Amino acid sequence: MIDSLHVIHSICKTRELCDELQLLSPITSPLPSPRKKRRERLPREAIATEELGLRTLLQIAAKRIPLPISYFEPLSMAQAICEELRYADRTLNKAALSNDPLERQALVTAFAVSGYSAAMTRKQKPFNPLLGETFDYSSESGWRYHAEQVNHHPPILAAHADGPGWIWWQTLVSATKISWTGAAEVNTELSVRLRIGKDDFSWNKVKFIFENASASPEHRRLKAHGTMLVRCTNGFSSVVIFNKDKKTEISGSLINKNGIHVVRLNGYWDRFLRK
């Protein structure tokens, strides 16, 4: 019987060939994952904008014709929604470790409000993704995000994220209404969902108003208006009031199982929320 190892060594006349054969041996330890380089800016600059004029904007809304390219920013909606998770490590990761239902409710409410903070710098419209287009993101703090455009007309985006002890998801269906005053109102129809352990949370998104929508981005004013209600299956809830006449100022409270407002909340939706 011929020794197979002896045959291999007799064939490998050079050290280089032996090294090549060694590469074919089974891997007993996982390969190190390459370090990801985070980009510090968008891959493309926004195109110089132009004022559309109110009549043009109303015609676009009535006839459902495409907006000019200058009206958009070099970002898709799948990427823009990911920005709602920018403070997940400071809120949801802590909420998953907390055993106090009131503290957990406060952290989830802070997370729900923090999702609007990026909107202040987003005064142009993101592109609607193509049907079937996806976007994935992995954060350095351990949470992962995936989104896919699941319908084209009307545009519907399904988004999902998970982190240490929590799962977040939403189906984005929004409607835009343009008024004769030149303001564009964006209403989101479905709630955002979150699961931490055995607790299921859900909350609605408030209305966004872009004043001077026909003007160039630097002259547009962004306001949020409405009442956000954050519900949990454990009986706790919270309410946050957005008032368009108070700029970004918000107020609210945490509510216990008995329906009593036990903690007051105040702050600014683009800066902070405190109790």
Image (cartoon, rainbow, N blue to C red):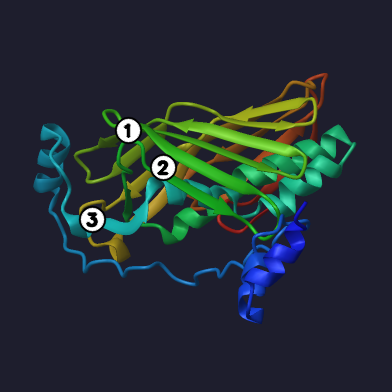
In front here: 203 or 257?
Answer: 203
Q: Earlier in the sequence, mark 2 or mark 3?
A: 3
Rendered image quadrant of residue 64 = top left
Name the front one of labels 2 and 3: 3
Name the outermost residue toward the right.
Answer: 99
Between 158 and 176, the one nearer to me in the picture: 158
Residue tagged 2: 208
Camera-side residue of 270 and 128: 128
Query: Could you say where residue 123 lies in the image, as x and y percent from the top left?
Result: 36, 57
- Disc number placed over residue 155 in the picture, else none: 1
Circle 3 is placed at which residue position? 71
Q: Determine whether 112 is above or below 124 in the image.
A: above
Inter-mark Cα distance, 1 to 3 = 18 Å
Which circle, 2 or 1, is nearer the viewer? Answer: 1
Residue type, label 1: Pro
Disc 2 crowd rating (10 Å Cα; few below 14, some 14-19, many 20+) is: many
Residue in the image at 76% along x and 48% along y: 93
Q: Which amino acid does label 2 sit on?
A: Phe
Residue 187 appears in view = yes
Please tell me which of labels 2 and 1 falls first in the chain: 1
Residue type of the residue flagged with mark 3 = Tyr
Q: Residue at x 67, y 38 (%)?
A: 252
Count every numbered label the image shows and give the total. Answer: 3
